[in-house]
Amino acid sequence: MARVSFQPTSPTRFASTLAKQWGPTLGIWGVGAGAAALFLLSVTPVVKKGLLVNVPLIGNYYEDKTPASDKPF
């Protein structure tokens, strides 16, 4: 019959092993959630003016080119 022996691991080794295993998965999910949030919030003026207009390559797409006479407020 085999004997079971307890081999203690240090907390830093446990944390690094956990980070190696879950880091890429959580990173991919985080990027996906961030992209979805940015896509869903891209119609709000706060996100559009504060963030999307300032991005170098896509800023021109999100600029408001509506003349002042056509804006109701």
Image (tube, helix red, strand yellow):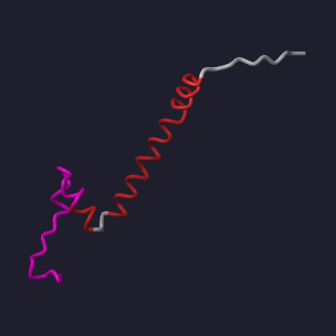
Residue 16, compared with residue 66, is above or below; it is above
* Residue in the picture at 42% in, 50% down: 32
In this rendered view, identify the residue nearer to me: 16 or 43.
Answer: 16
In this rendered view, identify the residue nearer to me: 32 or 71.
Answer: 71
- Count up the numbered dots: 0
Residues in magenta, as a range: 50-73
* Residue in the picture at 54% in, 23% down: 12
Image quarter (top left, top right, bottom left or bottom right) of the N terminus: top right
Residue 19 in the image: x percent, y percent? 51, 31
In this rendered view, identify the residue nearer to me: 6 or 60.
Answer: 6
Residue 72, compared with residue 24, is above or below; it is below
From the viewer's perspective, is 48 left or right of 18? Answer: left
From the viewer's perspective, is 1 left or right of 11? Answer: right
Please say whether residue 9 is one of the residues in the magenta stretch.
no
Residue 30 in the image: x percent, y percent? 44, 47
Quadrant assignment, res 17: top right
Residue farthest front in this picture: 11
Residue 26, compared with residue 14, is above or below; it is below
In this rendered view, identify the residue nearer to me: 17 or 32.
Answer: 17
* Residue in the picture at 29% in, 68% down: 44
From the viewer's perspective, is 28 left or right of 10? Answer: left
Residue 8 in the image: x percent, y percent? 68, 19
